[in-house]
Image (cartoon, rainbow, N blue to C red):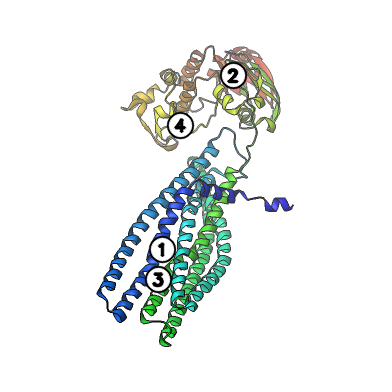
Amino acid sequence: MATDTQRPRPGAAILRTALRRNIGAMIAGTVLMGLYQAAETAFPIALGLIVEHTMQDRSLGSLGVSIGSLAVIITTVSLSWRFGMRVLQKANTTEAHRWRVQVAACGLQPVARDVDGLKSGEILTIATEDADQTADIIEVVPLLVSSLVAVVVAAVALSLADIRLGLLVIVGTVGILSILAVMSKRIGSSTQEQQAKVARAGAKVADLIIGLRPLHGFGGNHAAFGSYRRVSTDAKRQAITVARVNGAYAGTALALNAVLAAAVSLTAGCLAFEGRISIGELVMAVGLAQFIMEPLKMFSEMPKYVMIARASAERMALVLSAPPVTVPGPERPAPGGDLEVDDVRHGTLRGVKFTVAAGEFVAIAPYQPRAAADLVAVLAVNAAPPAYEGVVRLGGQELADLSVEAVREHMLVNPYDAEIFGGTLRTNIDPSGSSRTLSEAVEASMLTDVVALHRDGLDYAVRDRGANLSGGQRQRLSLARALAADTDVLVLHNPTTAVDAVTEQLIARNIAKLRRGRTTVVITSSPALLDAADRVLVLDEGVITAEDTHRNLLAGDEEYCLAVAR
């Protein structure tokens, strides 16, 4: 139990990684920002010396040196701040980019991660806002150190005038930080809760946008909006809570800093009145008391930003440290191999068994849509081998022994609701730009009329989710993408449900022609596709109940006739 308690949390490990790989930029930034704070602190000291020389020595040479020093200090302040912040902000931006890419890479990995129920919208928030806030630690540490430099320089300068002034600054700073450290813990917990609620609201918006059309179709948009409004209201309330805590923190910090500055000024005034310090030292002390409020304010705000960065790092750790749903094997299937499903039980599947030989075109006619979806999930490795009973073999090897990347290079499973991306027709069909069968895929999917309809042809701009395409056009675009991939094994799920009967007949013939000699499985109830297949497997109540050609099944199986006749 003690070991678990002492084990570093993933969020802390993320912060350490960010600090370690930016150590060079942070050292440079710390030096420059420390120089800036030291020069800022030297400004009231120089003013005090000018007054001292003017009132006592009345030496023009000393006065000239002091004024020259003041010019050097001002130049140092300007340049050190400029270049220090440039170094730190560049490192901050670069680090945020790294974390965004890393979180995105986790979401795009072939093997899904067990992210404890996080939705895609929440992961998007983690990859943007949380990545940015985590990277802020790159700036926080140098600013914290440079503020400490300012406080130390001010304390030393005041101590040279009178030890009591220096001790007052040191004791006051420690007291202020102790009070604010307690308050910053509340900020961290409140901010983490707010980030979670904002992420949930973002996920809800993403879900609503995806389902906007069907929602309008059955009039569910008002209920959906009400659901989002409740989630957003929770996020708003938490944001108000965080704002209150931040306001209390900032107000307390400002008040404590002002009290310390006033205490230093009053003490210096009393000491000057008693003759213990000179007028020049009084001017310096009052100037430092006013100046020290700024680095103290920055110094006191740093714990808050540390807690926010840590809360964001903890949320990123939910994604980055999540274990994969399954650990794939290292093997690769033999090229052009067959597909075998052996007694698979998953969801509504109750022991499905069939074999598709290499180069064969097989259609599966499911009587229940749910069974088709469960079979597609297994073949697409969306349901990993440990999640179902039975075995699926590709090229004679079990899926559990194959790497997911190799499975998907060898076998493409194209779902009926495949996404259409913003871009062009060409980039949707051939994202990598490496397909050798692009034109054949366009013709086979009957997408030629869409290409011919627009002056830009394949470079016609497609809006996000194919909003400027009809349902049939989106479906044919998805089919063209699947055919252009030209994989050894292709599995299509209801590829023609949104096209008319004549187009469906042409697509069925084109698929059979283009895929001749390549293994093809079509899960469909379309008579045209069933007739184009070499044989048809009937999937009923989770098992294969019949196997023959489409026409033989029509002639001898009345239930099959009722299921597929249109």
Task: Of the two numbered discs 2 and 4 on the same chain, state the one appearing first in sequence.
Answer: 2
Task: Label 4, secondary structure: give it.
Answer: helix
- Of circles 4 and 1, the one toward us is 1
Q: Residues within 10 Å of mark 4 (few under 14, many from 20)?
A: some
Q: Which residue is mark 4?
A: 471
Task: Of the two numbered discs 2 and 1 on the same chain, state the one appearing first in sequence.
Answer: 1
Q: Which residue is mark 3?
A: 291
| Image height of 302 relative to 279, above or below | above
- The residues tagged by marks 1 and 3 sit, at their Cα atoms, a distance apart of 10 Å
* Dots 4, 1 in contact, CB < 8 A: no
- The residues tagged by marks 2 and 1 sit, at their Cα atoms, a distance apart of 75 Å
| Image height of 288 relative to 83, above or below | below
Task: Label 3, secondary structure: give it.
Answer: helix
Q: Which residue is mark 1?
A: 37
Q: Which amino acid is tagged 4?
A: Gly
- The residues tagged by marks 2 and 4 sit, at their Cα atoms, a distance apart of 23 Å
Residue 363 image label: 2
* Dots 1, 3 in contact, CB < 8 A: no
Residue 385, position as x, y percentages in the image: 67, 29
| Image height of 81 relative to 397, above or below | below
Residue at (41% x, 29% y) in the render: 427
Q: Which amino acid is tagged 2?
A: Ala
Task: Label 2, secondary structure: give it.
Answer: strand
